[in-house]
Amino acid sequence: MTHVVVVGAGPAGLAAAAAAAEAGARVTLLDGAEHLGGQFWRHARADDDAPRAPRLQHAWSRYRALRDAVRRECEVVLGASVWAIDVSGERAVLHALVGEADGRAREPRSWRPDAVVLATGAHDRTLPFPGWDLPGVVTAGAAQAYAKAEGIALGRRVVVAGAGPFLLPAAVSAATAGSRVVGVYEANPLRTLASGWLPRAWRLAGAWRKGIEAAGYLADLARHRIPYRVGTAVVAAHGRERVEAVTIAALDATWRPVAGSERVVETDAVCVSHGFLPRLELPVAAGCALSAERFVVVDEDQRTSVPGFWAAGEITGIAGADAAIAEGRVAGASAAGAVPDPRALRMRARHGRFAERMHAAHGIRGGWTAWLTDETVVCRCEEVSYGRLVATLRHAPDAGLRSLKLATRAGLGICQARVCGRTVEELIVAERAPGDATSDARPLAIPVRLAELALGEDATPSQRKEHDV
Amino acid sequence: MASVIVVGAGIVGAAVARALAHEGHAVTVVERGASAGGTSASGEGNILVSDKALGPELDLALRSTELWRALEAELRAELPRDAPSIEFEPKGGVVVATTDDGARSLLAFAARQRTAGVVARELGPDEAHAAEPHLTDAVVAAVHYPGDAQVQPAIATEALLASARLAGARVLARAEVLAAAPGDGRIAGVVTSRGTLRADHVVVAAGPWSAAVAERLGSSLAVLPRRGVVLVTTRMPRTVRHKVYDADYVGAVESGAAGLQFSGVVESTASGTVLIGSSREQRGFDARLPTEVLRGLARRALALFPCLADAAVMRAYGGFRPYAPDHLPVIGEDARVPGLWFATGHEGAGIGLSLGPAELVADLLAGRPPSLDPAAFSPARAGLRTAERAA
């Protein structure tokens, strides 16, 4: 019986696990969180916790169906952080630590499966701006999680800013939780948004659910009297102990602030999101090829370039939960040795186009570095300022990313460049030629205690008995 | 004065470029990627005498260490005041033996080194704990080497390049050497992906990629990559005062075995992290990281410092070190292709050993009697040629 290990229990991973089990494989589903659902279905804490605010919760019934199928058919290991994938031997070995991240008694477990589906998802990307490190400035993802899980308002007067469709639900969440949302500021101008979304719009027709979703959010914005401004950005946050105000400026099409357009808005909470970055640690450790846009390259069956490894969801392109579910179903079936369901293939084709559309409409443009000042902190872990980076580049005019990071310590702190890596890469590109290196390789996907590394138990066969399907 | 192309903008290439530019040669550094982007950016920054056995490599290390001690002041005088510090830290090393056998060979090794002028102070268990309070209780004997030091290798490379530029050197990054420029048996320059450059001499300082460059330039070189991996912990209160090695370090450095080897090397950095090395393994340019390597490193470090059990390792990085079959650097002119020079093969000691070879190349190129006997490092030496013929 084929043993499939799925890493990540968000939409893609849940769908992959369910599809692999349906195809007759023995399936182990791993996730570092204590609950199924990933970031997207983060509310799914208690088993039958119905969503608090219906609009906040997407496709709740779909989640419940997937969750139930996975619980019935798969071995689910929650709190399992996969810290390394070892592909040096004949068969890949996944090493995980199971238990609370800050507890001392994490249990080491390893798997040597026939097939691996990576569905590790994405995290928020936030561009730095002066004051972004003030308390009260949070990522939209964190704000959303807070609102979803706790239902607690982030502040009295909330500003939502950045780029991408995710700003809309973030604003609605904040409003539903009781905050007054002063405005939603999307950096791309209408022209860019239109040129991304409108051409051959009929091609998106199959993904009508998305349109309804977006329309619903826009209607919510209107109902809460939340202005949606395009071609504008928060270019600075001000305050002593915490954020008290922000400067909003108009941007040109390259995201360069337009001089004289600045105005100051009072606020006590700012949610920012400039898009999402795929979590690439495990695919990179496995040796999976990445595209020029730095997503995992997959074929028709979601196979990566490495035999035995499949990938699904946001690590193959930021396309949202519907695409992730479709990709997961294809990947899971294929990893189990079955032919993917044609309905899943059709669904993937419909939703997959969103990835390129979204990038065309909401992608980051290079002019943003103009809103940085010398004092703006770029790497928060090591407190490295923009001025320091630029000065170091001036002293080392042929240096690339590695040299710059070692000289300034940018990206060498506890987050290991997850927050600032792309930013530092882009600053080098802005100063000179295309980059020579990336921050994607992190052989240790999470921090691991020295004693845990020393233990290094060999792969143990899964304890679970073969079951009837 | 001659025109010289240096291939490689790592620490050795930067040191050679600086030495030659300061003599008035017209120097161009050609680098395939960015400066300090390969081996020089993936090690600990060791400047060691402690691990060198009596012989030509120890002589080179002693000379290089002298040059390092002078370099910081020289750079401070040459470079702009706000240039980053190379973080030269003469903190010394402590080599620790935890078995009676290990202690015997460590003390005998140190006694031989002393005949060459190495300062190597024997420490009993109590003295060892005074020097390193968190050291394992299992220590039987230790040797303190005040001459061992530490530098930030990437900053040092950039600083050497900056100094070379001030002396007129040019750096051409993102230019890959493809072939030798057409000539009549003598090297006439290089064809790069960014055009052809002509010069009287070409110095290959391309680290583990030197063999490939030598081949493109019509010669050959028996230098291969050997991978080393280092672990980095999150910041913590300073726990380790010196560079601390287990006594097996010396054995692993000198061994020619292809299999995975470990030697514990633990030290705190100025930023508060702890660096844990080091593994050595011949696996070509394979960058995949077996967990066996991580486990071995962790076990060695815990054997030296049991108190690090809860230290969180946040990063593992590996690099390819250039090694020659007889474990000596290759420094000098290639008799088969006049005008072609090598400065490579320093294995895991390239940061510490970079300055000596640069001086040696400058001396030989100028026809001066060198401060060290170059014969042991010659590209024509028997230990190298035999391996090349076998290949």
Image (cartoon, rainbow, N blue to C red):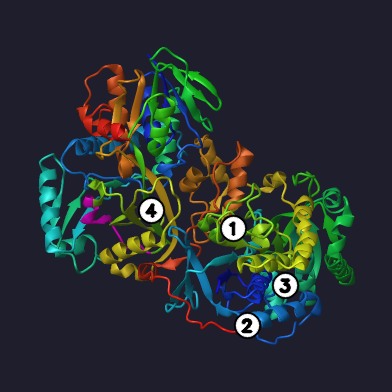
In the image, taking residue A151 as reference, residue B296 lies left or right, namely left
**Which residues lie in the magenta part?**
B237-251
The residue shown at (72%, 61%) is A245
Real-space CA distance between mark 2 and mark 4, rounded to the nearest whole angstrom: 45 Å
**Mark 3, residue position:** A155
Real-space CA distance between mark 1 and mark 2, rounded to the nearest whole angstrom: 43 Å
**Mark 2, residue position:** A469
- State the residue in front, A172 or B238: A172
* Quarter holding residue B60: top left
In the image, taking residue A326 as reference, residue A465 lies left or right, namely left
* Quarter holding residue B242: bottom left
The reply to the same-chain question for discs 1 and 2 is: yes
Residue A227 in sight from this viewpoint? no
Residue B366: give x, y in percent of width and height: 30, 17
The reply to the same-chain question for discs 3 and 4 is: no
* Image depth: mark 1 or mark 3 in front: 1
| Quadrant including the C terminus of chain B | top left
Residue A457: give x, y in percent of width and height: 38, 71
Real-space CA distance between mark 1 and mark 4, rounded to the nearest whole angstrom: 25 Å
| Amino acid type, mark 4 | Val
How many marks do you count on the picture? 4
Residue B77: give x, y in percent of width and height: 38, 32
* Quarter holding residue B248: bottom left
| Amino acid type, mark 2 | Val
**Mark 1, residue position:** A419
Q: Secondary structure at mark 3?
A: loop
**Label located before the other in sequence (3 or 2):** 3
The reply to the same-chain question for discs 1 and 4 is: no
Real-space CA distance between mark 3 and mark 4, rounded to the nearest whole angstrom: 47 Å
State whether residue B284 is above or below residue A206. above
**Mark 4, residue position:** B229
